[in-house]
Each structure stands twice: as C-alpha cells, then as structure tokens.
Image (tube, rainbow, N blue to C red):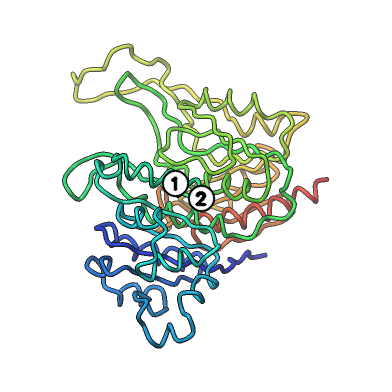
Amino acid sequence: MTAAPSARRILLGVSGGIAAYKSAELVRLLRAGGAEVQVVMTASAAQFIGPLTLQALSGRPVRDSLWDAAAEAAMGHIELARWADLVLIAPATADLLARLAQGRADDLLTTLCLASDRPLWLAPAMNRLMWAHPATRANIELLSARGARVLGPSVGAQACGETGEGRMLEPGDIAAAALAALAPRVAGLAGRRVLINAGPTFEDIDPVRFLGNRSSGKMGFALAEAAAASGAEVTLVAGPVVLATPPGVQRINVRSAAQMREAVLDRLDGMDVFIAAAAVADYRPRECAEQKIKKSTEAFSIDCVRNPDIVAEAAARQKRPLVVGFAAETREVEAYARDKLERKGLDLIAANDVAAPGLGFESESNALTVLWKDGRARIETAPKAEVARLLLEIITERLGARA
C-alpha cells in the first residue's frame, strides 16, 4: 500500500521587496507538494528576481501586466481569479498591503485580488519600523477583518542590517500551511478528539545549558493543522519550538520531558487518537546546577537518569485511544520500528530515516514507513503537510478497523 499526493491550484503573487528571492524556493516547495502554481509579479518584484526563474520553476508563463493584449483578450485577470483555489502573496510589502487595504486595482495583482472570491493569504516582509508603523498596523487589521489570513512576519536579521519583526516567514513554513489548508479533508476525523505532542524537550544542565535534540516540531504541527482542518478537536502539546499555532488548535507549551508527560497524560482520557510525534529526550541530568557550571577541566561528564516513556505509558492504559508512535532511525529503520511497535504495545508506528538526504531533522519534506500489527504502508517523499494528511488517512482507517 502506497499513499500518493493530491493536486490544487495556487496563485502566487510576488511584490517588490528583497524577500522576493525566497519566492523561487516557495514555488519549488509548492510544486513538490503537488500544487499547480501560477506566478503573478508586480513591476517592482521584477527588479529583485527575474520572471524566467519563476517560469522555469512553476512550469507556467509568469503574468505581470494588465496590458498583455493576448491574455486580456479573454479577460485574463478574471480567468486567473477563477482558476485559483488560493491567492497567496509572498512577499507582501508595505506598499502592496496599503493598496489592497484601499481597494486599489492599479496593476494585475491588485486587480485580480479584487476580482477573486478565493481565500487571500498574505506573508508580509518589510523593515521592522515599517511593520510597526500605525498605517501598516491599520492596513493589516482592515485586511484581516475582511477575511485575509496573515502569515507572520517572523523576527530576525533583516537585509537593512537591523534586527526585529518584519522578516517574511521561511518558504517551507508558508508552503506547509498552504498545502495543508488546501489538502482534501481526511474523512472520518470530523468530531474526533486528537492529542498530538511535537517538538523536542530540553533537559536543563544548569541555568545556561541543556540537553536537547534537533527536532523542529514541523511534522507534529503539520499533523495538528491537517487534523484540525478535517474537523477534529485537536490538542497540541508542544516542546520549545518557534512555530505558529495552527488555526483551530489548542496548544500547551512545555519544555522538559516531565512537563510533556504531565500535559499528555492529564489530557489522554476521552481522546480518540494520540499521536506521539515529539522527540522526547531519553535522559535528563540527575540534578540541575543552580549556577552556571564553569569550565575548569579538560573533560566534563554529566550523571543522567532515564526519562519516563510517555508513549509507552499511554499505550499501557486500560482505556486508551488509538496510540501512534514515531521512530526516527539512522539504520535498519523498519526493523527497529517494528520492535518498538511490539515492545511498547502501540497501534501504529511511523518510521523515518533521518539519515536520508533532505529527510532529516529540520527539513521541509519527509517520507514514512507506517507499520501496524499485520500490515504496512509507505508514504513517499513529499512536503510534511502532505505527508501529514496521508498519515492521518491511514490512522483513520485503522481507527475504523479498531471499532
């Protein structure tokens, strides 16, 4: 059994800011996720990135003018507005936000936004002071009130040399959200109660240092978003990650394995599904130093004790939900995963090879081998939003078989 991705149509608007260079990677990721992408550029955007680059990546001619006689002979801007399932503008500059808020239609991109009744998503990108300016804040509030969804911006170093809020979200995060939102809803999840944990745990050594791992939390967050979009009531217990909470998801933030265990087990009763996607630290320091440990010797050792096994505890409960584990392995992936499935009494386990190029921690894509007592399924490489949807389909099938 092999799960395959689905297709959807995204109109990507690119406006004129330095973050326009990221639109090339965004197009690539959207296409990799099975989406059809039509790029519409403003004149200013073409000063930062060439249309031919985006045409090559999207597989479609880039549209950039209302005065294209061939395209507009058939009212091309109206056709574009009708064609799209989603209008996504990334980057959305302060100027573009102002023009959209005013309802202006002075170029192709703003005109088709007025002519479209499809969801409008905006990924702002600008200098921190421009983002904080009252005019920009008012424009964002107005556009949000009209139904636009605003993605970000994030905080970090900016091209102008300053640091602050205003960076466009990374293409992987934008693509994941768009693909999840447009993915077919997973039948059978509406009304179900789903508990998911995600991200790493940090085990403090002293007030400065900790033991942790490289988990980004993106797979667990993608599962939460896809489940919520399919009508499930989703609770997400998140380790220390910098990710936006998916729409409609209740989020509980934790730091350590002990905190995650408490948050999960306290909420397990009444759940239909528990998906243990978090990379919980196996060990923690026996004691956390009250003060920073100073560098004084060539060698340094930490006395560690084993952390509780959250997913095993959940699976051992008499009245329990369907319990799904994850296994991140670097060799003999299926053998180790099958052992974990049986030893911990799980209903399913999703195994991934984190040593495979492009599929390790912090990557935008994933591929899974899903195992249960008497079967297996393979989810081939795709963006994590798509992998999440396909995994949820398998989980729902097993949930039905369990009933």
- The image's mark for residue 142 is 1
In this rendering, position of residue 32 left or right of residue 399: left
Q: Residue at x 30, y 77 (%)?
A: 52
Quarter of the figure that contains the N terminus: bottom right
Q: Secondary structure at mark 2?
A: loop
**How many numbered discs, if any?**
2
Across and down, in percent, residue 319 comes to: 78, 30
Residue 371 shown left or right of residue 384 in the figure: right
Residue 103 spot, x, y in % from top left: 42, 58
* Numbered mark located on residue 37 in the image: none
* Residue at figure coordinates x 27%, y 49% from the top left: 126
Tell me the crowding category of disc 1: few under 14, some 14 to 19, or many 20 or more residues within 10 angstroms, Cα based: some
Q: Residue at x 17, y 48 (%)?
A: 160
Q: Which residue is mark 2?
A: 146
Quadrant of res 6: bottom right
Q: Are marks 1 and 2 in contact (CB under 8 Å)?
A: yes
Q: SS of the residue at dot 1? A: helix
> In front: 114, or 179?
114
Amino acid under label 2?
Answer: Arg
Above or below, comparing residue 235 to residue 294 in the picture: below
User: Amino acid under label 1?
Assistant: Leu
